Amino acid sequence: MRIKMNFKEHTVRLMLIVSVLSMGVVEIGTAQTITKKFDMNQPGTLLCSSSGGSVTVDAHEKNEVIVQAFVRKKGEVLSPNDSDLEEVLEGFDLIIKKNGTEITAKAHRKNRGKFWNNTGIYFTVIVPHEMSCDVSSSGGSVKISGVEGTHDFSSSGGSVKLENTAGTTTAKSSGGSVSAYKHKGDIKLSSSGGSVTLDKAKGSVYAHSSGGSVKLKNIAGDIDAHSSGGGVYVSGEAPMVKAKSSGGPVKVDISNVSKELHLVSSGGSVDAVIYQGDKLGMNLDLGASGRVNIDLYDFSGKSEKSRIKGTMNNGGIPVYMRASGGSVNVQFED
């Protein structure tokens, strides 16, 4: 049996059952096959990827990283002394190591052997709150909670879900939905296989879906949202909103507009509720295949049934709206 270990870097490359048994198991949550702990005395980076299963990252108050690997066969998690473990691990390159402040946990398939469709390795990693993360899965979902840093999350086989995160963040999926709840910092969300949702965020937001709707609620920051597979729905305090849909309506409910409002739908109507909008100076350019409905204040320009172009309150903020599949409806609220 061939075992490769670098104790200086806390590296474990697990190819055979002997190396698994040498690591031991710590009882945390659901019974896992392999567990490894690393002390962390300063913020670090997690590099985690799996080609055979999902990845979950949770934060805790301790200055340590706990990597749990769950080796699965036919839907069952194998124990460290399972007779099938050695054969399953031979189909993967499994690496768990620490190098300085960088933690690596990766499980990649080596080939498509006879057990390929019935096996997998998925991770649960518990980290300090201040931990930057680069996490991906090509065979399952990605779920992240409680981390703060610079992040890149992706899945090509499932959904991506974030909760209570902070820092400059990118999250994308080509196989499912992308969702985030309570985020602080600039964030980019995209999905080619499902919807994109974000609730309670502070920072600039970019959101795109080619497979479903985009729903952004309680946002405090600039917004750029686009969907080619559904509607776009936006609410919050947004100095700038760019929202476009080719597959449904565009609906915004916003306050604190100060930079730009650009709303376009080729698949439905455009509906905008703008708080204190009747007091704003705006350069209006509104058009629809149906009607344009808006109460104009101190207006100068051209007003027709399906087109309005001119200034309100002496002009100022660019406001462009187009609906080629319905009406444009603008409402001002106190």
Image (cartoon, rainbow, N blue to C red):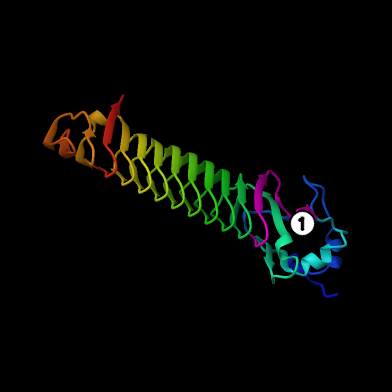
Looking at the image, residue 98 sits to the left or right of residue 202; the answer is: right
- Please give the name of the residue rendered at 60% of the width and 47% of the height, measured from the top-left corner: 147
Decide if residue 193 is in sight here.
yes
Does residue 68 lie above or below 322 as drawn? below
- Please give the name of the residue rendered at 36% of the width and 34% of the height, measured from the top-left corner: 254
Q: In which quarter of the image is the N terminus?
A: bottom right
Q: In which quarter of the image is residue 103?
A: bottom right
Return the x and y of residue 33 as percentages of the image width and height. 80, 56
Of all residues, the one furthest to the top in this rendering is 334
Q: Is the magenta stretch mostly helix, strand or loop?
A: strand
Specify start and end residues of the magenta stretch as a single range.
Answer: 48-77
Q: Quadrant of residue 84?
A: bottom right
Of all residues, the one furthest to the bottom in this rendering is 2
Q: How crowded is mark 1: few (under 14 residues within 10 Å), some or many (20 or more)?
A: few
Depth order, front residue of 323/199: 323
Return the x and y of residue 295 as percentages of the image width and height. 21, 28
Return the x and y of residue 143 as percentages of the image width and height. 62, 48
**SS for dot 1:** loop
Depth order, front residue of 93/209: 209
What residue would you read off at disc 1?
74
* Residue type (three-letter) at the residue carrying disc 1: Lys
Q: Does the magenta stretch include residue 74?
A: yes
Q: Does the magenta stretch include residue 162?
A: no
* Total numbered labels placed on residues in the image: 1
Does residue 225 lie above or below 255 as drawn? below
Does residue 276 lie above or below 15 as drawn? above
Looking at the image, residue 254 sits to the left or right of residue 280; the answer is: right
